[in-house]
Amino acid sequence: MSERGEHEVPKVVTDLPGPKAREIIDKDERFLATVTKASPLAVERAQGELVWDVDGNLFLDFASGVSVINIGHCHPKVVRAVQDQAAKVIHFAGTDFYYDVQSRLVERLARVAPGRGERKVFLSNSGTESVEAAIKVSRWSSGRKQFIAFIGAFHGRTQGALSLTCSKRVQRARYFPLVPGVTHIPYAYCYRCPYHLEYPSCGIWCAKILEEVYLDALLPPEEVAAMFFEPVQGEGGYIVPPREFIPELAKICRAHGILTVDDEVQAGMGRTGRMWAVEHFGVDPDIVCMAKSLGSGMPIAATVFRKELDWKQSGAHSSTYGGNCLACSGALATLDVIEEEGVVQQAAKKGEVMRERSEEIKARFENVGDVRGLGMMRALEFVEDRRSKEPAVKLRNDIVSRAFHKGLVLLGCGRSGIRLIPPLTIEERNLERGMDILEESISDAVRDRA
């Protein structure tokens, strides 16, 4: 029997945080800059969907390292691949020299990425770096300087990627001026339509407005290099647009020679029940950004684009650690696991369980205003009441805290949402157990606020 099947899940045996965790938290708060911690969890080890803290408490993970651990913590195949590679060579600057593990990975990513035709791949270390590469390659190849992005978008925190990000005010505050030339337009957030329209009678105005208003009155289309979009917005609240939204935007972009950049950093690698979230919408992007779950915890990212967009001059862009040997080995092993264990199919099947349970929870609690998602990328949005739709931020935070003290690890998203992103390989009984704890936590929080 696997270690995952040998334990009562979850099992909290100390106050939270426990004494050892408290020591770590105190040191962290003293020395670590920019603390954005979600829960007082000090991890000692993890396996699959299980996480042990330093005090011996056992948690069920519905956060997956922010959708990094799609195939579960410390998958044996990934561990072996990284260990074997570490015994050979850890780093030798793939920017300046050659090694097989890097060339095999880029060949594979060029084939598996969404889109048609021959592809090139640029390797880096994080999602924000993959977006920076997309910014640079789209400007370099098109000769154009401006960009379109969306309100609610999160594309990273480096200065270029941050200029595209429009998720939380705190992320942009005090960093002005950002990179100029980015125009943000509203995303298709039907639960809170910025135009106060109803789908489908709206006629997808949120997409058509790009051409009928922005490209007509504000943005000369011949100056726009690319449009950046998340097929499912992540930090913005796990917003799933209508099926017509992205195809309509892509059609407008094609008509004006504007490149489409698909940010799959959080939604990709099987999370939505398809290998890539954009596949739900039938669009072939020009450029794709991927990271997070690509390396199952190893820091690696990729920007995949049509071959003809490639920089034509050596040195126009580079990254010392991009394509690091260990990270490439982890990524190749991750892709093997996804194929061999039918992980994408698992996500589609288990995602239906999550959808049904989420709908049942919504029917039970008036403070759940909306449930949404694709595959195993799910969210619940909490409101003070369904009529006003006022975000219930304190209630959401209380639910996350209560769930943590019951042994379930959760993360918020958007203004008042909770994202549900367990490993795609989670055992079905643990998936059900996690949904039970979530429902219990909502019930307790709603009862005690009455």
Image: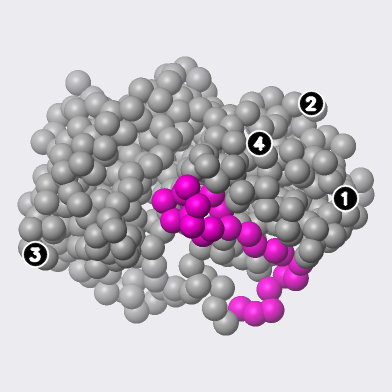
Q: Which mark is residue 247?
A: 4
User: Residue 413 appears at what percent x and percent y?
Assistant: 39, 56
Q: Which mark is residue 117?
A: 2
Between 202 and 243, the residue placed more toward the observer is: 202
Q: What crowding class fits label 1: few (fewer than 14 Cα within 10 Å), some (14-19), or many (20 or more)? A: some
- Marks 3/4: CA distance? 45 Å
Looking at the rendered structure, which numbered label has been put on residue 450?
A: 3
On the image, numbered disc 1 is attached to which residue? Answer: 142
Residue 281 makes an appearance in the image: yes
Sooner in the amino-acid sequence: mark 1 or mark 2:
2
Q: Is residue 255 left or right of residue 197?
A: right
Q: Residue at x 39, y 67 (%)?
A: 36
The answer for how far apart the CA atoms under marks 1 and 4 are is 22 Å
- The location of residue 68, given as percent across then percent down, is 45, 44
Model colouring: one colour
Assign a secondary structure to mark 1: helix
Q: Residues within 10 Å of mark 3 (few under 14, many from 20)?
A: few
Q: What residue do we see at 43% from left, 35% from top?
A: 374
Q: Position of residue 162 (x, y in %)?
A: 61, 65
- Horizontally, residue 409 falls left or right of residue 106, namely left
Highlighted range, magenta: 175-198
2 vs 4, front mark: 4
Q: Nearer the viewer, residue 369 or 350?
A: 369
Q: Amino acid at mark 1?
A: Ser
| Amino acid type, mark 4 | Pro
Residue drawn at x 78%, y 57% is 215
For the residue carrying disc 4, how many other residues have a C-alpha within 10 Å: few (<14), some (14-19), or many (20+)?
some
Question: Residue 19's image quarter?
Answer: bottom left
Instruction: Please state which amino acid type lies under the numbered disc 2.
Output: Gly
